[in-house]
Image: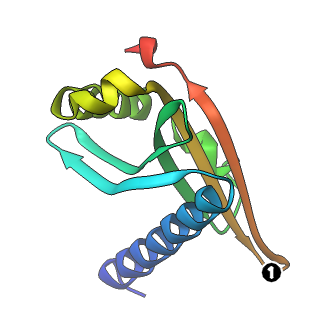
């Protein structure tokens, strides 16, 4: 399998993980307001609200845990990118900034032979970390 094929598979798996994460959040009372918010600093996979928070959610999907759980891939560098994107999002959408308290979440998806495992970590890292 060449790199182009591998990248396509990885992208498809990531998209499927985001779809599952959106459905998981909706089933738990969240309202998804945007997906794949992109800016020059990076991308936020899901922006959702839960009543009092605006949740900037990173989705990590994996098929193996050789290098840890999917959430472990959200290292300090990735967190900084996400924080900058979230701050820009709030500047561009001041109504959300006024009505909701911001929060950084992670939804990890692990595909195994036994099935699909999903875990939501609210407030996974602090907005003040940036």
> What x and y, as percent, mark residue 29?
64, 52
Q: Quadrant location of residue 127?
A: top left
Residue at image location 51% in from the left, 19% down from the top: 126
Up the image or down, 61 lies above or below 38; here it is below
Up the image or down, 84 lies above or below 43; here it is above
Residue at image location 36% in from the left, 74% down from the top: 7
Q: Quadrant location of residue 10?
A: bottom left
Residue at image location 61% in from the left, 63% down from the top: 62
Up the image or down, 113 lies above or below 91; here it is below
Q: Quadrant of the N terminus?
A: bottom left
Q: Quadrant of the C terminus?
A: top left
Q: Nearer the viewer, residue 54 or 120?
A: 54
The mark tally for this picture is 1
> What x and y, as percent, mark residue 49?
49, 42
Q: Is residue 32 left or right of residue 21?
A: left
> What x and y, as percent, mark residue 48?
46, 47
> What x and y, as percent, mark residue 18?
49, 64
Q: Is residue 102 left or right of residue 122?
A: left
Up the image or down, 58 lies above or below 11; here it is above
Residue at image location 51% in from the left, 70% down from the top: 19
Q: How did the renderer colour the structure?
A: rainbow
Residue behind mark 1: 113
Q: Residues within 10 Å of mark 1 (few under 14, many from 20)?
A: few
Q: What secondary structure is found at the residue carrying circle 1?
A: loop
Q: Is residue 67 left or right of residue 97?
A: right
Q: Nearer the viewer, residue 35 or 50?
A: 50
| Residue farthest toward the right in the current orientation of the protein | 114
């Amino acid at each position: 399998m060449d790199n182009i094929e591998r990248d396509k598979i990885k992208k498809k798996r990531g998209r499927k993980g985001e779809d599952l994460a959106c459905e998981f959040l909706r089933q738990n009372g969240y309202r998804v307001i945007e997906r794949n918010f992109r800016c020059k600093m990076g991308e936020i996979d899901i922006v959702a609200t839960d009543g009092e928070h605006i949740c900037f959610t990173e989705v990590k999907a994996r098929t193996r845990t050789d290098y840890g759980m999917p959430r472990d891939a959200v290292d300090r560098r990735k967190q900084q990118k996400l924080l900058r994107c979230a701050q820009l999002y709030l500047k561009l959408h001041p109504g959300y900034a006024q009505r909701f308290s911001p929060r950084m979440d992670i939804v990890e998806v692990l595909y195994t032979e036994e099935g699909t495992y999903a875990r939501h970590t609210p407030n996974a890292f602090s907005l003040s970390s940036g």
